[in-house]
Amino acid sequence: MMERLKRRRKELGYSYQDLANLTQMSKSTLQRYETGGIKNIPLSKLDVLSQALETSREWLMGWDEKKEASSASRQSDGFFRLKKGLEPYQLSEEDADFLIAVFEAHKQKNT
C-alpha cells in the first residue's frame, strides 16, 4: 500500500503539503504512511486519502488492480475538494446549497 500511495500522489503532482491541505492530515503523518512508519491506517483516513488521490481504497490497499475510482467516488471527490476549499468562508446554508447546485450542474454538463 505504501508504494501505491506514493505513486498516486506523484502521478497527480501533489506534494506532501498539497495532500495535507486536501486531507487535513499533517505532512509528517502522510510521510509516515508512505514510508511504513505507520502501518495501520484507520479506515476513515484511508477513505479521505482515496478521495483526495482520486482512486479507490481497494486499489490503495492492493485488493484491486483497477485504479479508477467509481463514479460515485469521483463525485464525492469533487464535492470533497469544493467543501475543503470553502471551509474558511463559513458560508450560510443557503449559499452552500447554491454552490452545490452550481457544482452539480457543471458536473452534469461535463459528463
Image (spheres, rainbow, N blue to C red):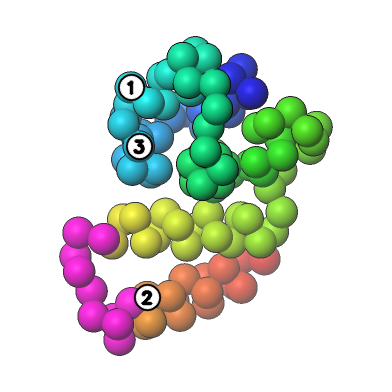
Among numbered discs 3 and 2, the one appearing first in the sequence: 3
Marked residue nearer the N-terminal end (2 or 1): 1
Left or right, 108 with respect to 52, comes to right
Residue hosting label 3: 25
Residue 11 appears in view: no
At which x and y percent is residue 105?
A: 53, 77
- Which image quadrant for residue 73? bottom right
Q: Residue at x 47, y 28 (%)?
A: 13
Q: Is residue 94 magenta?
A: yes
State the SS at label 2.
Answer: helix
Residue at the location (58% across, 19% down)? Answer: 2
SS for callout 3: loop
Mark 2 crowdedness (10 Å alpha carbons): few <14, some 14-19, many ≥20: some
Total marks placed: 3
Q: State which quadrant residue 46 falls in.
A: top right
Determine which of the numbered discs, if any, sits on residue 20 in the image. Answer: none
Helix, strand or loop for the magenta stretch, by majority: helix
- At horizontal 48% and vertical 21% (from top left) the residue drawn is 38
For residue 48, above or below residue 6:
below
Q: Position of residue 27 (x, y in %)?
A: 33, 26
Badge 1 is on which residue? 28
Name the disc covering residue 99, or none. Answer: 2
Q: The disc labelled 2 sits on which kind of residue?
A: Leu
